[in-house]
Image: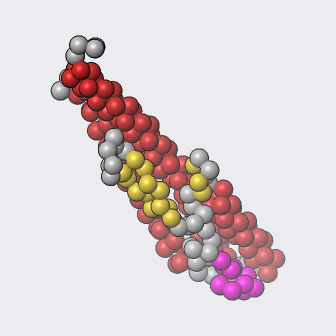
Amino acid sequence: AKDDAAGQAIANRFTSNIKGLTQAARNANDGISVAQTTEGALSEINNNLQRIRELTVQATTGTNSDSDLDSIQDEIKSRLDEIDRVSGQTQFNGVNVLAKDGSMKIQVGANDGETITIDLKKIDSDTLGLNGFNVNGKGTITNKAATVSDLTSAGAKLNTTTGLYDLKTENTLLTTDAAFDKLGNGD
């Protein structure tokens, strides 16, 4: 190695590239995990929205007594509380991914600027427009079945968006793996 300074410099550069690409692959995997964690939480929020929609439709029938409506409202409140709990407690590596608006930058390449930015959106009963939602006439927002349906669609759209982040991150990981293959083959 002492006699071949140029060869040593090339080997050092390859070693540096390999280490950078190895870390980029780990980062891309973390990005996939963030997307999967967020998608799981959004799925749970969507399940709660579906149940709220079902309860709202049930409450619109004229055969319910005041006691029935109060029971339905109690379950709706529990579902809204669960949406808020899921939003507040969904974390990846200590970062709350649904508790506030923000962004997360993932370095997915060995060089500066090779990043993916994941937009994080606050999703809770307030941002969904359901704070105070009620079916018994005792709250601030009365019986919004159509709005709940729209919000359920919004929940599905959020899942689709998360899937796009997942897909982009997986594609970056595949590109990183291809770079490893090229380095290994001397290309």
Residue 161, by quadrant, is bottom left
Q: Quadrant of the C terminus?
A: top left
Give residue 30's position: percent from left, percent from top.
Answer: 48, 43
Residue plotted at (76% across, 70% down): 74
On screen, residue 174 above or below 154 = above
On screen, residue 10 above or below 20 = above
> Is 69 in front, or is 99?
99
Q: Is residue 162 visible?
A: no
> Is 73 in front, or is 131?
131
Classify residue 139 as left or right of residue 109. right
Residue plotted at (47% across, 50% down): 35
Give residue 78's position: percent from left, percent from top.
Answer: 73, 65
The outermost residue toward the right is 67
Residue plotted at (56% across, 57% down): 97
Q: Is residue 134 magenta?
A: yes
Magenta range is 131-141
> Is 36 in front, or is 119?
119
Q: Main secondary structure of the magenta part?
A: loop
